[in-house]
Amino acid sequence: MKALTEYYAARMGLSLDRVRISSARTNWGACNAQHGINYTWLLITLSFYEIDYVVVHELSHIRHRDHSPAFYAEIAKVLPDYEQRIQTMKADQWVLEIFKEN
């Protein structure tokens, strides 16, 4: 995940502090104010198509701390098909739902 995140960060002209894998069970990823990104180990259940979206989504939070139109425009610069990727991920949301309850 670190290499993939660094690849997209360089493509987006961003710097990041660190990349970690966690046992989070409610979100695929999270970006903190210090530009550190955490991913849940549950990403292993997703396709590379979906994982790319999670990475770019979290990196976009470095510039936009919200989910505003500007945030999604940032994602679209790298992944113009991001809306289709979101739809694909909705079918895999059950993974988080199962582990959220345990």
Image: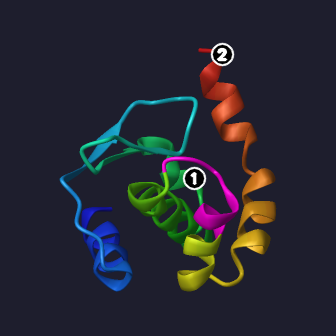
* Mark found first going from the N terminus, 1 or 2: 1
Q: Could you say where residue 65 lies in the image, as x and y percent from the top left?
A: 49, 48
Looking at the image, is 95 positioned above or below residue 45? above
Residue that badge 2 annotates: 101
Quarter of the image containing the C terminus?
Answer: top right
* Depth check, front residue: 61 or 39: 61
Say few, some or many: other residues with alpha carbon within 10 Å of mark 1 (under 14 / 14 to 19 / 20 or more).
few
| 5 sits to left or right of 77 | left
Kind of residue sitting beneath label 1: Thr
Q: Position of residue 91 (x, y in %)?
A: 81, 53
Is 90 or 13 nearer to us in this picture? 13
On the image, which quarter does residue 76 sit in? bottom right
Residue named by callout 1: 45
Q: Is residue 78 left or right of residue 7?
A: right
Residue most toward the left? 17
Residue 73, picture quadrant: bottom right
Residue 95 to residue 58: above or below: above
Query: Which SS class for mark 2?
Result: loop
Mark 2: amino acid: Glu
Left or right of 20? Residue 77 is right
Query: x and y percent of residue 12 in the render?
Result: 38, 79
- Report the colour scheme: rainbow
* Segment tinted magenta in the rendering: 65-72
Residue at the spot 26% in from the left edge and 72% down from the top edge? 6
Circle 1: element type: helix
